Amino acid sequence: MNKFYAGLMPNPERDEAPEPLAADGAPAAIVWNVGSVAERLGISPSTLRTWERRYGVGPTHRTAGGHRRYTETDIERVTLIKALIARGAPPMEAARVAQTTAVDDLGTALVDASGDDHGDDLEHHQIVDGIIAASRDYEPDRIRSLIAGALRRDGVIGAWTGVIAPALINIGREWSEGRLGIEAEHLTSEVVVGELRAHTRAAGRLDSNGPTIVLASAESDLHSMPLIALEAALADAGRACHVLGAQFPAKALASMTANLRPTIVFVWASLPRTEDDEMWQVVTSMVPPTTAILGGPGWPDRPDARGQATVSVSLESTVARITSLVG
């Protein structure tokens, strides 16, 4: 079937109208099928079925035809699970709380669980565990909530050191050991980048008339997340910068530096660079007023050959070095 027309066909999971329920002359109540609940709450139907199958949280009403339907109370319990998971609770624990909460207490529990302080009351290791679990379950909204909460509470340096870097390292380890798919790693990385950029935008308009700071990754290096994290951390410090992104050519960096004469040039290298590498030659030949700062494990270990270049070993030390140089 043509995909365009297929999209217009009725979907029994999504398009079936909620059904009124009346018993013994009582006012009709509305019950909902799984597709309607999924659309209403922004949860995939497969996730709802998984929660029902694994944890017993699901529709409790049956129609005359034997079809299972969600009542409003059922939906409140599912919403509570979603909110608790977004705060970092393991799905099984979230389901236990939702199942054991009395009907009259569900409203209060939802208010408590749905606040904007996602992760504010969690230790770093709990947030990391929550991110890994959400990656495994392909739940970007849950990852986003935990990352955003850590950034609000701890700032970029604290969130990066305590939450983001450990989570990404552990996810990478699980992938290398075959316990997690590469798609989970990519999903998490994309969410992290999005939240770091959102954090930078939330800093408002930064003063771009001060010392010029340039951030780039070396030629053939695909990694740009360290640059985005540094940009966000500098935004926390009130500093604007130029982010040139991944795989920036050495010749272009040399030309830009000669014309712009920036105060700081930060270059990230994840892949090994040799001493005859063109980017290495560019960064080690920079002269005042430009200081080159090198990040990442790819640079040659030759302190005597670095000239004006200095090596950064962490996000915190990089920000401290830059802020000290730009005054």
Image (cartoon, rainbow, N blue to C red):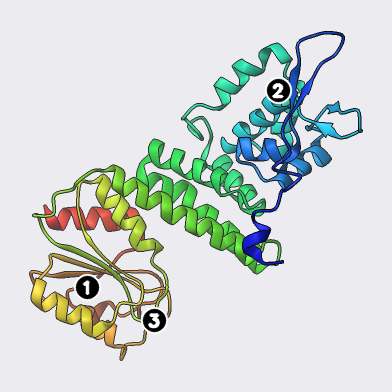
Q: How many marks?
A: 3
Mark nearer the viewer, 2 or 3? 2
Foreground of the two, 270 or 252: 252
Looking at the image, which residue is at 80% across and 36% down?
Answer: 55
Tell me the residue at 30%/91% (across/down): 276
SS for dot 1? loop
- Quarter of the image with the N terminus is bottom right
Residue tagged by mark 1? 309
Work out whether mark 1 precedes mark 3 in sequence or the reverse, and give the earlier one: 3
In front: 2, or 298? 2
Local crowd size for mark 3, using a 10 Å CA cut-off: few (<14), some (14–19), many (≥20): few
> Residue tagged by mark 3?
220
**Residue 166, above or below 305:** above
Label 1 Cα neighbours within 10 Å, binned few <14 / some 14-19 / many ≥20: many
Q: Amino acid at mark 1?
A: Ala
Residue 141 is situated, as x and y percent measured from the top left of the image, at: 55, 45
Label 2 vs label 3: CA separation? 54 Å
Circle 1 or circle 3, nearest the eye: 3
Mark closer to the observer (2, 1): 2
| Residue 147 position in % (x across, y down) | 47, 45
**Circles 1 and 3: CB atoms closer than 8 Å:** no
Find disc 2 in the rendering and name its residue: 72
* Location of residue 223 (image quadrant): bottom left
